[in-house]
Image (spheres, grey):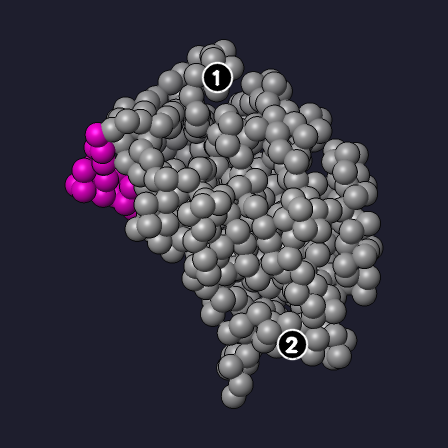
Amino acid sequence: MSSTASGKIGTWRNWGGNVSARPAREVTPASVDELADAVRRAAGDGLTVKAVGTGHSFTSIAATDGVLIRPQLLTGIRDIDRTAMTVTVEAGTPLKRLNTALAREGLSLANMGDIMEQTVSGAVSTGTHGTGRDSGSIAAQITALELVTADGSVLTCSRKENPEVFAAARIGLGALGIVTAITFAVEPIFLLTAREEPMPFARVLSEFDELWTENEHFEFYWFPHTDRCSTKRNNRSAGPERPVGRLSGWFEEEFLSNGVWQVANLVGRGVPAVIPGIAQVASRAWSARTYTDIPYKVFTSPRRVRFVEMEYAVPREAVADALRELKSMIDRSRLRVSFPVEVRTAPADDITLSTASGRDSAYIAVHLFKGTPYQAYFTAAERIFTAYEGRPHWGKVHTRDAEYFSRVYPRFGEFTALRDRLDPQRRFQNAYLRRVLGA
């Protein structure tokens, strides 16, 4: 068996369990040359090609009935440039491995999302982000990209080299080529102090601008069926390092956030009437705490309770109004919502199809426990978000199409024109891209 072959071809499923696909074949390339060869062979066989990471997207963005590329052999750090302060990493590298490797080198990304199981290429291609007043998504920290295009050639891009490709490919949706390596800007490792505390819903919204202005990273969770939120402020610190204690960390992150939460959601899924009561208890379970640690240990946390998620970016100035409407809708309805609503922010960036492209943004994420019918809740929430010209996360559930995106993304035509040039035969097409980018 060649090193590019995969022994099993079966059904691929995503992490959330709501998407599956049966590819014609799977390929696990061990080099960029092998990946390029797999793309050329697919073209010869008339098959489409999609790369898949860890399946953390809730959309079918990676699903294919053609050739499924698994990048787990394309991992590791290629180069650390301490003069330019950049790191170049293979596309299949999990964010967790990148973060720990950078920490060993005394380096860090400026900002990151709250989970780190995804591959770097999967995370950037879908626009994964954390929260930040001044620092943007993971893709906004990219300084150069390498990708295999539809004809099997290898293309590199940066602000100076192929800048029109760089503008789009940092969040390329898998539509422009298969990312093989990414160069990120990094900085000397630093400390963050996290301050977590409960706060009433009305106070968070009335003080939102102030909380956003005064903190480098502000986010909060609101528990539907309650008037309570859990807030988190992360700011750079001179130290000393004061990490969460091992016992209290296990209690908060594993016992409460994963163990008890899993049981509570199983009960709520079986008996929805108890969900408001569970929400009241859950919203009181998270107490105030302050700790100081290196960035990835503050930004990220384990997520073992599986869920399905929709998230929309709205203009930052509209977030309080949108949340008040969301709360009013849930309060008036017969919906029983077991998961908290997560709210984060990002500054405007210059990436063509970034959810923060050209505007300061706030993200509102709604979740439901895996296996719970989510359509009614997500449809009602989506109606609110789209009234504010909301832009859905490319890797999370939504029903929008190319006609909608052409209205809410001023540079949408720029992206589709580049796609026509790089992939005229639609080698990287699938049903999701046909919907969101047009035929």
Mark 2 is on which residue type?
Answer: Asp
Work out whether residue 307 or residue 393 is closer to the camera in this orientation and state it.
Answer: 393
Image quadrant in which you'd find residue 409: top right
Tag shown at residue 14: none
Query: x, y (%) of residue 200?
Result: 40, 16
In the rendered structure, the answer to whether residue 208 lies left or right of residue 196 reads right
The magenta stretch spans residue 423: no
Work out whether residue 176 or residue 211 is closer to the camera in this orientation and state it.
Answer: 176
| Residue positioned 70% across, 75% down in the render | 40
In this view, the mark in front (2 or 1): 2
Query: x, y (%) of residue 166?
Result: 67, 48
Question: Circle 2 is placed at which residue position?
Answer: 37
The magenta stretch spans residue 245: yes
Mark 1 is on which residue type?
Answer: Thr
Relative height, residue 410 to residue 306 (above, below): above
Q: Secondary structure at mark 2?
A: helix
Work out whether residue 82 or residue 328 is closer to the camera in this orientation and state it.
Answer: 82
Relative height, residue 29 to residue 241 (above, below): below
Magenta stretch bounds: 240-262
Question: Circle 1 is placed at which residue position?
Answer: 213
User: Could you tell me if residue 379 is visible in this image?
Assistant: no
Q: Counting residues from the N terminus, which is met first, the one under dot 2 or under dot 1? A: 2
Image quadrant in which you'd find residue 400: top right
In the rendered structure, the answer to whether residue 434 lies left or right of residue 90 reads right
Query: x, y (%) of residue 121?
Result: 54, 55
| Residue positioned 64% across, 25% down in the render | 315
| Residue positioned 53% across, 72% down in the render | 31
| Residue positioned 57% across, 70% down in the render | 32
Relative height, residue 323 to residue 127 (above, below): above
In the rendered structure, the answer to whether residue 354 lies left or right of residue 184 reads right
Q: Residues within 10 Å of mark 2 (few under 14, many from 20)?
A: some
User: Could you tell me if residue 3 is visible in this image?
Assistant: yes
